[in-house]
Amino acid sequence: MSSSNLRSSQTAGDRVHRASIATTLLLALSLPAATAADVSIGVDASDIRQTMDGFGSSQRMFDDPHTFNNFNATTRRAATVMTRGQEDQILDLLYRDLKLTRMRTAIDVPGYEPVNDNADPNVADLSKFDFSWKGSDGYIDLVKRAQGRGLRTPFRHGMWERWMNESNPAELAEYVMVTLLHWRDAGVTLEYYSLLNEPGYSVGAAEDPKRTVTGEYMRDVIKILGPRMRAAGLATMLVVSDDIGPAAAEMRSRIILSDPGARPYVGALATHLYYFGYDCSGLQALGRQYGLPVWMTEFFSGVGGLQSDWLGWAGLMHDQMWMYDVSAIDYMFGFFGAWTNGTDKLIALNTSGETYTGYTLSREYYVTGQWSRFVPQGAKRIGSTTSDASIKATAFKDAQNIVVVAVNANSSATKSIRVALSGVSGMSDARPTRTSATDSWAVLPAITFAGSAFDAVLPPRSVTTYVISGGTPSNQAPVARGTASPGSGTAPVSVTFDGSNSTDADGTIASFSWNFGDGTSGSGASVNHVYATAGTYAAVLRVTDNLGASSTITLTISVTVPPAGNQPPVARVSATPTSGIAPVSVGFDGSASTDADGTISSYAWSFGDGTTGTGSSVNHVYAASGSYDVRMIVTDNSGATSSETITITVSDPTPPTPGTGPIARWTFDEGSGQSAADSTGNGHTGTLVSDVAWTSGTSGPALAFNGANGQVSVPDFDPPTDLTVEAWIRPGHGSGVDRMIVNKHNSEYDLRIDDNGNLAGEVGNVRLIASGFDFGGSGNAGRWYHVAYTFDASANVHKLYRDGVEVASGVNTASIANQATELRIGRHSQFDFGTFLGDIDDVRLYDRALDAAEVRADARQEVVVHGAIGGGALSEQSGAGSRGCGMGSGSALLVLALGFAAGVRRRCRSMSGDA
């Protein structure tokens, strides 16, 4: 029975489907002894890998308007209402039937402190916090109900409020502390808390708190938060960095863990797997370095660059556990409304209008259960190998069973397998359960062992779990025991570590490995180590026995600053970049500054151009060329100061090289009619089609597009090998659909504003997206922007620019196809949709990839002060956001000709509107 036929009338027994008699007999037969299996699977019970922290979901509440995509204005909840019994039925499915053990609860913004409670982050005014419903209390109720059904690890993911910023990490520390105490007072002690959700992902709106934050900021929050948690009796461990991709998660987590003041409070490393690949090897290495588990806390099949069907989800689960030692896997979502695509939830909540009508179990539900129903929290993953890459196998053991999960990814080939176990003896049989396109947890007849192996058959596109019991492990892991003397002291302090009391019940200890928690390591049963600076250090001893099994123990060392008179802080400044072409945005970081006998209380910056700033990390834009001496002054908690200076060099942009201009350029200087001439003389004249209108542009006429119909059609011509597409655009307000700037078939080239308001470019069906700036958003629409997309075939690189600044870069190994389609400005040429909403001016096409300086030169040939001039006074021009010469009677825009005269199409000759 397919998942689409499953409804709320099912019982738990109905959901365990039996294969047909013929299929069962065929698949359960052991291979004849003389027949060689197609695939050999080896399982080594003595090869201990990661400890499994369980399987779960990221979750919203039943009455959250997001869940059903509807809203009741009176109750301010979802318009679809489920009874308590209907909700409990879903929780039974997830935590009793599927046997999930984890729940990662969501948080919305604004959260429960929409305005700062007071100016003191050390004293919380609880009257300003609203924990009702989605603030926390609704989730606390959901967690308690799930705990009664098998939930063991609830944890909250964090978000900061709109008013928060990186200048005051103590405010976020206060926010988290109030949260943890509220949950504890309500009867739920959170073992884990994720500090911030996706700190490397920005939705682009300036007022939205989902904007990027640095690892240094997260580190500083943890250094404040950690001691406060322990002082309040909270044992909560923090999860970092819960980023949108593993590379970003590794980068931020490495910054956090490298600081001994933050490291002891981190309990797990976490990543999501959206868009940026699933290679977690860097995060895996970092986890091994610091003895921390790695979790995958958000993903659903069918998303981003990892699009797949239900079997792809099975392959991804295997790869994360087998390749990268991931200890926990959380799907997004456990339950959710059926209004979205079918793969973003394990259980779809169905509706008719606004009435709940039952549920549907997805194929991903059954795939997840091939692991979650048989691999308990606390089980160990053990070594497994296969002789065929199309067959994936993960293996686990606990006190009762060995579990082997085998995935046949072949679309049509049935594979015979022989599973051979080592490191364990006395097995009698293997009990298989299977999910495939037609089976959902089908219970198959037991298979008898022949010695230490058994034979079976895997049908195509299937996941089969074999539960093996009755075996006796041939090797027991050793028990790590260690001491540290002294356990605390004044820096520098010499500590003697002794692990000689560690034992191994059935063998000998072969090695002692020490990680001192300050980035250094050692070996031997007894070692000495000197801690030179103050901090709290987690020293980890790993003992390994003669058969390779291992265990660890963690010892905490506290090092304090020697008493003395106040010592001044030491200022340390870094900048990225230290040079560039105007305008250049420079990030300054003073967080490496130290104070040996106290804390740094303030950072003051003088940027060398007459402006100043505060905070440990700041950004500043230099609009003009020059050499700037930037000085940072740090002040400690006793008033002592120190400073350091760094020099920033800013150059003027270089004009394009003569003779290498565009191969097509549409300036739209005509101002009327149905033709748009190609000013390069190459004959690529465009024709205005349908509802395209003339309007005022950047420095003359431009074209207005209504978002519904119309385009400029240019007859087909051969594409170049390398490419640059540039345009001036003034987007209208709103998003939700793609808006084409230039398109000539997706397999050729494309420049657009995508359905999320992001700038996007494409060659050969490989798309690059510059997320983080919504062109149609409030405050952004109605202004002129210079946008560019470059593609360098020889370097396999494509880039996006906004106003002359690179905003995205990526690898593109495709080539520009040669399709017999016209080029269109303002609408898609391949699928005939996506009319631009707003104005377009001065479109250029180059047969080479311009470098950053050339793009910047094109973008800065004219710089505008936004304002109208009338009667000799400069006044604000509401909503104009214009560029170039004003066309209105008696007014003009002040133009600063900072570019190169040869490249400027038209300059204002007077201040009276005469152009």
Image (cartoon, rainbow, N blue to C red):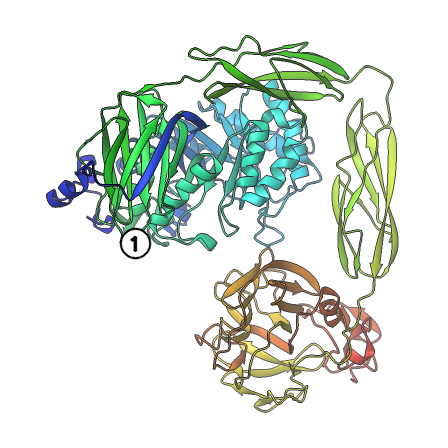
Q: Residue at x 87, y 18 (%)?
A: 565
Location of the C terminus by quadrant is bottom right
Q: Residue furthest left?
A: 21
| Rendered location of residue 461, percent (x, y) | 29, 49
Give the quarter of the image for residue 472. Answer: top left
Q: Residue at x 49, y 21 (%)?
A: 550
Confirm whether residue 562 shows in the render.
yes
Q: Which sits in the foreground, 31 or 11?
A: 31
Compared with 472, 582 (above or below) is below
Q: Which sits in the foreground, 870 or 726?
A: 726
Give the left or right position of residue 254, taking residue 419 as reference: right
Q: Residue furthest front?
A: 34
Q: Residue at x 59, y 74 (%)?
A: 721
Give the quarter of the image for residue 898. Answer: bottom right
| Rendered location of residue 574, percent (x, y) | 78, 43
Q: Secondary structure at mark 1?
A: loop
Give the quarter of the image for residue 186. Answer: top left
Q: Residue furthest bottom?
A: 673
Compared with 29, 513 (above or below) is above
Confirm whether residue 348 shows in the render.
no
Give the left or right position of residue 482, taking residue 885 as reference: left
| Rendered location of residue 435, percent (x, y) | 26, 43
Q: Which sits in the foreground, 599 or 51?
A: 51
The residue beneath circle 1 is: 411
Q: Looking at the picture, which amino acid does disc 1 mark?
A: Ser
| Rendered location of residue 13, percent (x, y) | 18, 35
